[in-house]
Image: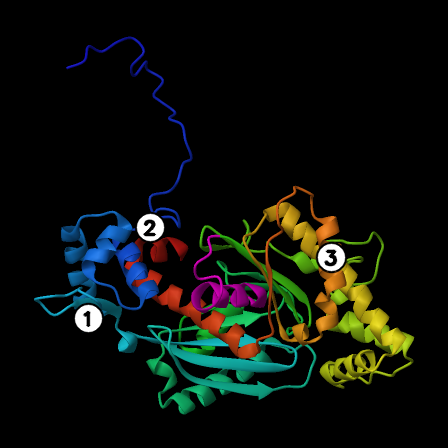
Amino acid sequence: MQPKGPMEDGGEGRRGCGPLIPPLSDTLRPLRQQVFERVRAAGLIPRVQVAKDLGVSPASVTTITQELIEAGLIEEVAAPREGDQGRGRPAVSLGVRANAHRVAGMKLSDREHTAVIVDFAGNLIADDVIPRRPGPMALDEILTAIQTLLDRVCAKAGITRSELSAVGIGVPGFVDTVAGMVMWSSVLTERAVPLAAAAQARLGLPVTVDNDANLVTLAELWFGAGRGLADFAVVTIEHGVGMGYVINHRIYRGTQGLGMELGHTKVQLDGALCRCGQRGCLEAYIADYALAREATTALNWTHREGQSISVLLESLYDHAKAGNTAARSIFRRAGRYLAVGLSNVINLFDPALIILSGERMRYDYLYAQETLAEMDMLAIQTGRPRPPIEIHAWGDLLWAHGAAALALSFVSEGLLVPAREMAAQ
Ligand SMILES: [Zn+2]
């Protein structure tokens, strides 16, 4: 025994040092959640490999996987033999039990609403799209749209709504995911709408909501180019300009869930008017409504209320391709502002990859060689290569997949981390 010296327990207690990480947090997940997530990410994986990957004993993995199998979340699968593996006994791997749960993911946008249904292993079962008239809707109207679309996509999947375990919904705008609140969205007439609770009451299912840019980031993290990257940025250019950021394989949302609003960072004092009500936002220079505004002025086009902005932009793009100087200069100017925005992202985060995503990426003038060269000039000069930029011109289905990933993590975390579910309520 050590003698008790005067420095020990000197009456004032000890404050300790180092970060105060709560026992159940994103950075310190329970082992059963880590095991489940490892199996889900691998697709199929032998027990011994799970133990190696997580740095724990095979015995504890065996105990935990037995629990997960009994709970019906994972299953044993006879794996095809590779090389000299599995000599003697048949090789058995673990995989997520795909039928254990089904979830729906939905993207509500100014142009159309999209939905997918995926199983617990992330396989697509059905998808559907409903076009809509542009413009904001009242809460009741949007709930009806959600219900209609959900019932349609369920019918396609051959299931009833009650067979779903959760629904993830993405909307453009400012969203507090933890509180389930939409603080502002171009698809809603009101501000500060408790969309998750309202949709949950209407559908009779657990609902989570998120910003649509976070959903496309989740889609890249779960199904796309971001699966193997610890940190990367996704910049979306659609009706607005959004951004999602992954730090240490997890999406970063900020303290109030309102972070990463790249579209509303200011690029010009007292500049162009933005949909958010402020001036000089990046979005006010490169989003589709900004391009349409320029087109109606420079080319003397009229844009009727209710007319599809996509049709107008398509026409602007055709004019640019055909050599129309005014049309080209509109895209070129938007590209220059995009370069400012991207160089700021590089200077702030130093990401491993920047993915430019969204339907507007078909308009290649936005990311022409000149734009990227300008971005290089505005980024800090270190002599090292800048992060690679990838262009993903995927449609709304990708965004809905991200919403499904949101719902999947909601379901699995609710099952694997009951304490956190209780704490969140
Ligand atoms: Zn703004």
Residue at image point 73% right, 57% down:
373
Q: How far apart are marks 3 and 2 (CA)?
A: 42 Å
The secondary structure type at the circle numbered 1 is loop
Q: Name the residue under label 3.
A: 373
Q: Which of marks 3 and 2 is in front?
A: 3
Q: Main secondary structure of the magenta part?
A: helix
- In this rendering, the answer to whether 237 lies above or below 129 is above
Residue at image point 65% right, 43% down:
383
The amino acid beneath tag 2 is Arg
Residues at marks 3 and 1 touching, judged by CB atoms closer than 8 Å: no
Q: Report the magenta residues as a range.
A: 211-230
Q: Can residue 371 be seen in this view?
A: yes
Q: Which of marks 1 and 2 is in front?
A: 1
**Image disc number at residue 29:** 2
The secondary structure type at the circle numbered 3 is helix
The amino acid beneath tag 3 is Ala
Query: Could you classify mark 2 by the number of other residues whose Cα lies within 10 Å: few (under 14), some (14-19), or many (20 or more)?
Result: some
